[in-house]
Image (spheres, rainbow, N blue to C red):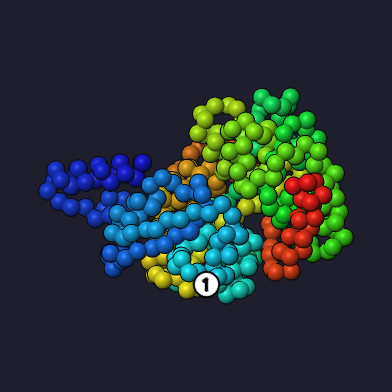
Amino acid sequence: MRRWMIAFISVMIASMTGGTLNAQEQGFWACPPQYAGQSLHIFNWTTYIAEDTISNFESLCHVTVNYNTHSSDEEMVAALRAGNKEGYDVVFPETTSAYLLRNEKLLHPLNYANIPNFANIDAVFKDRSFDPGNVYAVLYLWGSVGIGYRKAALPKPITSWNDMFQANSRVAWINNGRLMLGAALNMLGLDPNTTNAADLDRASAYLIANSRNVTEIADDTGQDLLMAGKADIVVEYSGDIFQIIDQCRCDDFAYVIPQEGAYSDLTSMAIPANAPNIALAETFIDYILDPQVGADIANTTAYGSPNRLAVEQGLIYAQYLNDPSIYPPHDVLAKMYSLISDDTIEAVFNAAWSKTLKAIGR
């Protein structure tokens, strides 16, 4: 909305002075003119963009964007493995999927001549292990997977995974073996990326032993269960919980990064190897990396922004920037972990997760 107002005011000034201002003179991102009339196909997570991000890009570049959403990375990875028949130009893989897509040569190398705003990304978010040298991916948003809960349903605030496992409340786990088994492995002092069968058996047994209060295994819909009063505690992505806190404009819900540590959720932008419009896809990525555009997305989704200029220019809402569950302090970050991936890791975790679900009757 803020961007729309800037554009509206600029047009009014131009009309009163008899002139026409270009995008750079208006003070925001300018689209190269050669893309007018073209189209772009985007495949992103649900609830993971600002309301006007796409419409503004269409207006600035005079293009058409086909915007589709999914609720799991598996859906996106499956589409690319099947040959990208839908013709997606930009996808948004999490860390584990970025490993898989890179290793399977399903991503196109980025031409940074078309992405000058890459300079705006903080150095800590560049050259990550899932994409050394940022050959294929640029970080989009970051957050965590922790615990969301309804305050009135609990006698005291949740601070740890153990609090969740011991609560006399309705609990919903997320239906993701890497996340749930990873949390259990971390609790047990083991490597969340292990392929050791004995370690995974211990993690599975730990979850089974602590499943007495589980009423649902949710496909990334924990926030909806909280809103509907169908669960009291959920394992969920941070931004999804902060979004319902913002939507309800109430003090009913809370989110916490458990004190034992949690998964650090990094989502990137990438281009499929056989994308129909690679140049426009790179231009779209450059647009997203504009400080104001990036800030609008971070402020809408309540995820952390990797955009250094967006933070330095004060474009991120102070209430988010000062929230330790969105922008954690160093001591909390030190306890968070990343997940790596390859076919071997995915296979052993999928088997352990299936075993876990069967044992708890889900």
Q: Residue at x 58, y 26 (%)?
A: 251
Q: Identify the element where label 1 is drawn.
A: loop
- What is the quadrant of the N terminus in the image? top left
| Circle 1 residue | 83
Q: How many marks?
A: 1
Query: Mark 1: few, some, or many residues within 10 Å (few <14, many ≥20)?
Result: few
Q: Is residue 192 above or below residue 241?
A: below
Q: Residue at x 58, y 33 (%)?
A: 227
- Type of residue at label 1? Gly
What is the residue that sits farthest to the left in this orientation?
18
Q: Position of residue 37 (x, y in %)?
A: 28, 64
Q: Position of residue 29 (x, y in %)?
A: 34, 55
Q: Residue at x 65, y 52 (%)?
A: 264
- Classify residue 346 by image quadrant: bottom right
Q: Position of residue 169 (x, y in %)?
A: 74, 31
Q: Position of residue 40 (x, y in %)?
A: 38, 63
Which one is in front, 119 or 279? 279
Q: Is residue 111 above or below residue 21?
A: below
Question: Is residue 352 at least partly visible in the picture?
Answer: yes
Q: Residue at x 76, y 56 (%)?
A: 354
Asked whether, in this view, residue 124 is left or right of residue 49, the answer is right
Which one is in front, 33 or 42? 42
Which one is in front, 284 or 132? 284
Which one is in front, 63 or 268? 63
Asked whether, in this view, residue 351 is left or right of residue 121, the answer is right
- Classify residue 278 by image quadrant: bottom left
Question: Is residue 330 at least partly visible in the picture?
Answer: no
